[in-house]
Image (cartoon, rainbow, N blue to C red):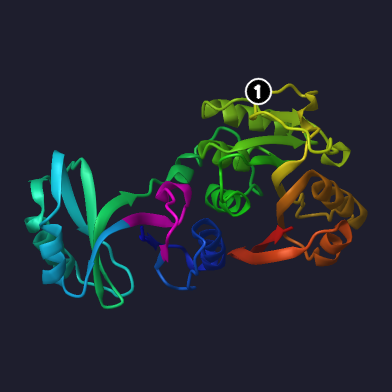
Amino acid sequence: MKHIYVYACHEDEQALCQLELRTLLGADVVLGARYAVSARRVEPSRSPFLKLRLDVLFEAGSLPELASQVATLTVQGSTFKVAFAETDAAVSTDRQREVAREIGRHLRGKAEMRRPEQWFAVTELGGRWLFGHCSYGEAVWLQHQQKPQNYSTALGTRVARAVVNIAVPEVVGTRVIDPCCGIGTVLVEAMSMGIDIVGCDINPLAVRGARVNLDHFGMPNVVRLTDMRTLSPAGEQEMGAAQPVSPNSPQDQARYDALILDMPYNLCSKLPEDEQLQMLQSARRLARRAVIITTEQIDSLLAEAGFRIAERCAVHKGNFSRQIIVCM
């Protein structure tokens, strides 16, 4: 089945949006566009940029032809509403309503404008008319902004969620670690998507804050107080799903499928290169795939640690810029 995704992003996050959706959907995402076509079925709420997913049931060369196909579909046991999904061209509100009403008129079932039990969508894309089931995204990341513990240099929840999706496009069977988890922004986003993740940090105040935030959202304690440079893989031994852990838990002794590392930084001082290299070498030992977030140029250190850069993008916020680097 073909799926049409409609998305939106701020101009400062276009490159991040493009990288995230390309990773999630396995399809080309044109910078500046507002839709993508994919054979993959992804829940829109996973991405902070996806607005809706249209699962194509019918496709036609004209609106009347599409309406005749829709007439063969019966909506049983529930109410419905048809919406217009704006894709490759701007369409006036009046025209959107006109098209939605015309298609809805041919559906056999009970229309409900306020609280329908089923949503359908219609769109015109590349001169073709498409119709199918519609799923809307929920801004889960927005809810996570209201956490009790914060600090100014932490990743925003929207960026954190996109980074998690870049690191973990396939949730099932993927073990993940955030070895500098701070107050747990990445952990909260990952766990809200059902991802098996653990975290650690060298800062006891950060670990305490992460635990408070996880508890606030009803999530288990998966954080321990540890310097990531002391972590080492224990071969390929299997680990179970992430469970609540104590600060001295030996659960770090494993190789992970993915790692998310937001390199520590301070606006007034710079982390010495030898410490950065030690952290990156530890990350290389721990995971097959890593997403590194940095405010500095560290390409040579990544190479020295044994990483190969696969993809990258930059996220800007005023004069502040972060690099998101996908490493293998």
Q: Residue at 12% across / 64% down in the picture?
A: 67
Residue 177: image location, x then y, percent: 70, 40
Depth check: give the residue in front, 115 or 316: 115
Residue 188 appears anywhere in the view = yes
Depth check: give the residue in front, 286 or 214: 286
Q: What stretch is highlighted in magenta?
A: 37-54
Q: Residue at 49% across / 37% down in the picture?
A: 146
Residue 197: image location, x then y, percent: 64, 36
Residue 234: image location, x then y, percent: 84, 35
Q: In this view, does 12 lie to the left or right of 97?
A: right
Q: Quadrant of residue 84?
A: bottom left
- 144 w.r.t. 320: above or below: above
Q: In which quadrant of the rendered image does the N terminus lie?
A: bottom left
Depth check: give the residue in front, 192 or 155: 192
Instruction: List the single residue furthest toward the right.
Output: 274
Q: Is residue 282 left or right of residue 314?
A: right
Q: In which quarter of the image is residue 237?
A: top right
Residue 181 appears anywhere in the view = no
The amino acid type found where label 1 is placed reads: Pro
Q: Is residue 282 left or right of residue 158?
A: right
Q: Quadrant of residue 301?
A: bottom right
Q: In which quadrant of the rendered image does the C terminus lie?
A: bottom right
Mark 1: few, some, or many residues within 10 Å (few <14, many ≥20)?
few
Residue 286: image location, x then y, percent: 79, 44
Instruction: List the single residue furthest toward the bottom.
Output: 127
- 313 w.r.t. 104: above or below: below
Give the residue at mark 1.
244
- 57 w.r.t. 187: above or below: below
Quick check: is 42 in the magenta stretch?
Answer: yes
SS for callout 1: loop
